[in-house]
Image (cartoon, rainbow, N blue to C red):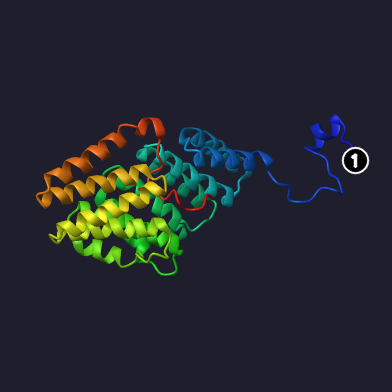
Amino acid sequence: MKCSVATVLLMGGCSSAQKTFPRVDDAFENDMDVGHSSFDLEHPGQAVSEYEAAYKRALLRDDVSALHDAGFNLAVARLTLGRPDEALETVSRTRADLALRGVDVSSLVDLSVVEAAAQYRAGHYEDALRQAAAVADRSGVEPGLRERAAFLAGLSADTLGRPDVVARSLGVISGDPRAPVHEQADHKELASRLDLSNGQTEAAWNEAAGAADLRRGMLDYRGMTRALRLAARAAHAAGRTDLEAEFTTRAAQSEAQMPQVKAVSRDAPSDLPAR
């Protein structure tokens, strides 16, 4: 069936028995798909532009599911780009727009995990710990989100000198060789931090070096350099200045390339499936 121009102008569209309802919003889907591709290719700046366009399209649609998905992805992309304050603003805006449409935003723990990651990256460690621990301690949370939250809680707690919380977070994360690689790396890193706080310096640098190796294999270079600097701290505490210099130099050389490679950070929950 053909539509006349007058029909489109006066009626706002045309119908056909061959078309299904509701129709797929191709513009929204395209913005999200290009955003995913850009993020996977480590171009978070382009991903931000695409997810922002998708978010505006979701507002046009007045679609709560689309708003949630686009808002989550936009916050993660901004965090990966090194803009934690913008990520926090995105989470706040997404929550407000969803609440306006009757959504219980307290149930959206994925946004809470992104917020905790942004708080950690911004240096707001108390806020990050509070937010992440609330998710890690909550029953019924998706295992992947709970693991991410526990890791962020452990990182924040270590920075605040709270080994008790690091130990509790470590109990949530599996170090089993059969566990996902990112979870094994998270376990080794928190174990290293706990060992270091307990004065077990040799175990600490071995665990940190192991975490760095795993993160390298994941192409997680920012997380790798964090683990190398942790290994340097442990080596310093052990009086091994030779190892301290080695780990510090390796970390510095990798970090010097960060502006070029725009490495995805494991501080952000970017390993989670895109919404």
- Asked which quadrant contains residue 80, the reply is top left
Q: Which residue is mark 1?
A: 1
- Asked which quadrant contains residue 12, the reply is top right
Q: Position of residue 188 (x, y in %)?
A: 30, 58
Q: Position of residue 49 (x, y in %)?
A: 52, 33
| Amino acid at dot 1 | Met
Which of the two residues, 183 or 167, is positioned nearer the viewer here? Answer: 183
Furthest toward the left, the residue is: 239
Q: Is residue 127 among what the camera can see?
A: yes
Furthest toward the right, the residue is: 1
Please report the residue visible at 44 percent of the width from the left and 52 percent of the height from the top. 111
- Asked which quadrant contains residue 195, the reply is bottom left
Please report the residue visible at 80 percent of the width from the left and 32 percent of the height from the top. 9
Q: Is residue 268 among what the camera can see?
A: no
Please report the residue visible at 33 percent of the width from the left and 57 percent of the height from the top. 186
Q: Report whether 92 appears left or right of 169.
A: right
Q: Quadrant of the N terminus?
A: top right
Please report the residue visible at 63 percent of the width from the left and 39 percent of the height from the top. 30
Q: Position of residue 170 (x, y in %)?
A: 29, 64
Q: Secondary structure at mark 1?
A: loop
Which of the two residues, 247 or 41, is positioned nearer the viewer here? Answer: 247
Q: Report whether 62 appears left or right of 226.
A: right
Which of the two residues, 139 or 96, is positioned nearer the viewer here? Answer: 139
